[in-house]
Amino acid sequence: MYRWAQDLWPICRSLTGEGVRITLNYIQNLLPELVIHDVPTGTKAFDWEVPLEWNITDAYIADEFNTRIIDFQKNNLHIVGYSIPVDKWMYLEELEQYLFSLPQYPDAIPYVTSYYKKRWGFCLSQQQRKQLTNQNYHVVINSSLKHGVLNYGELIIPGRSKQEIFLSTYICHPSMANNELSGPVVTTALAQWLEGLGNLRYTYRIIFIPETIGSIVYLSRHLSTLKKNCIAGFVITCVGDDRAYSYMPSRHGHTLADRAAKHVLKYHTANYDTYSFLERGSDERQYCSPGVDLPVCSIMRSKYGEYPEYHTSLDDLKLVTSEGLQGGFDVLSKALMLIENNAYYKTKCLCEPQLGKRGLYPTLSQKRDKDIYDMMNILAYADGEKDLIEIAEITKQNALDCLPIIEKLIHAGLLEEIKY
């Protein structure tokens, strides 16, 4: 995953354009079944419209000696996203209104965009800004805004059921690592892992989209299918650093995805940060909006907006680590496995079963070990009305650790799965 992030790092991505296509083509090489879709400029999607396609080849501010002071070729965050073409000379006093920096983070280049209003600008560190002198600067932006397409990638991994698990990540950010190269690379790894498992219970719908407009466009095309089939989903973002784990609930907060996320996090990490839906900021805004109401939440590492490097050049490949990416993959894969195996179980025996004759209980009366208690507690709560997650919560067990016990009990004819 880290190697993929290194490969994708230099690409200038935005809502649309060649950078998105290069990124999707890279992912398609890893996931050959990925389908890349085109949505033309001007396409209506609920209250929105697909914007013009933006592409950029170069941008710089040069001094009177033609020395580049600010250079897009050195860092693609130097340009305000979706900047219109510019080629003019101006003195610093006029140029200042087109410059963006962060005084509180003097070494950081901020990430700034203007998708839906035509303007231009440059981003630079506060240190760079302080070094500018009052001279005549040559300002050049070689970009284009034309009718084109919005691209997104979609992968369907079929399971035994038409019911779906939905995974969504976004590919519209330029060179930033936790937000947002970590999401696409971890999602790609999860897709490869799921394809390798085979015999999946649920169908997996996995999309790589530009944030906000991408999810709105996708919903405008697939809302009825998602509402009918989606039983759980995750927005996969900010899963690459190794500082923290975080949970962003769905709007309702008690969906299957929420329950699986909280249960897995409880046993995966010593502590994690829980946020309110009032602190939302990613595509859960669209998936959980009234009338859409999909059962979608997020499991993250350090949440967007909550770490100091967020949306700056400091969110780099030093902040994201191999270990951090692996941790993001591990917790999400556990959540998916829990949902895959979550079911309602019912004991087939009235009163407490005779476990000893089935080799499940010691025949000598002595202090019982925890495994025996766990088995008996599962039987005690397997009434056909509680699913695996609820039984595990009540009996204070890791649900994933319950699976081999349940398999034993089913094999012994003491437990059955109830189909609803």
Image (cartoon, rainbow, N blue to C red):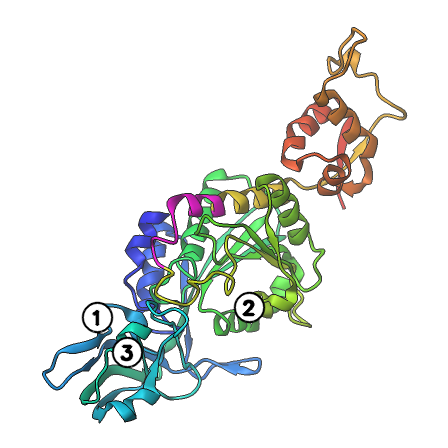
Q: Position of residue 49 (x, y in %)?
A: 49, 82
> Residue 387 is drawn in which quadrant?
top right
Q: Along the polypeptide, which appears first: circle 2 or circle 3?
A: 3
Q: Which mark is residue 130?
A: 3
Q: Which residues are magenta?
A: 316-328
Query: Which of 192 and 117 lies nearest the eye of the viewer?
Result: 117
Amino acid type, callout 1: Gln
Determine whether the residue tagged by mark 3 lies in a helix, strand or loop: helix
Q: Mark 2 to mark 1: distance in Å?
A: 30 Å
Q: Position of residue 238 (x, y in %)?
A: 47, 57
The reply to whether residue 29 is in sight is no
For the residues carrying marks 2 and 3, which lies nearer the camera in this image?
Answer: 3
Q: Mark 3 to mark 1: distance in Å?
A: 21 Å
Q: Which mark is residue 73?
A: 1
Query: Which of 229 and 279 lies nearest the eye of the viewer?
Result: 279
Does the segment drawn in magenta span residue 168? no
Amino acid type, callout 3: Lys
Determine whether the residue tagged by mark 1 lies in a helix, strand or loop: loop
Q: Position of residue 220 (x, y in %)?
A: 56, 73
Residue at the spot of label 2: 281
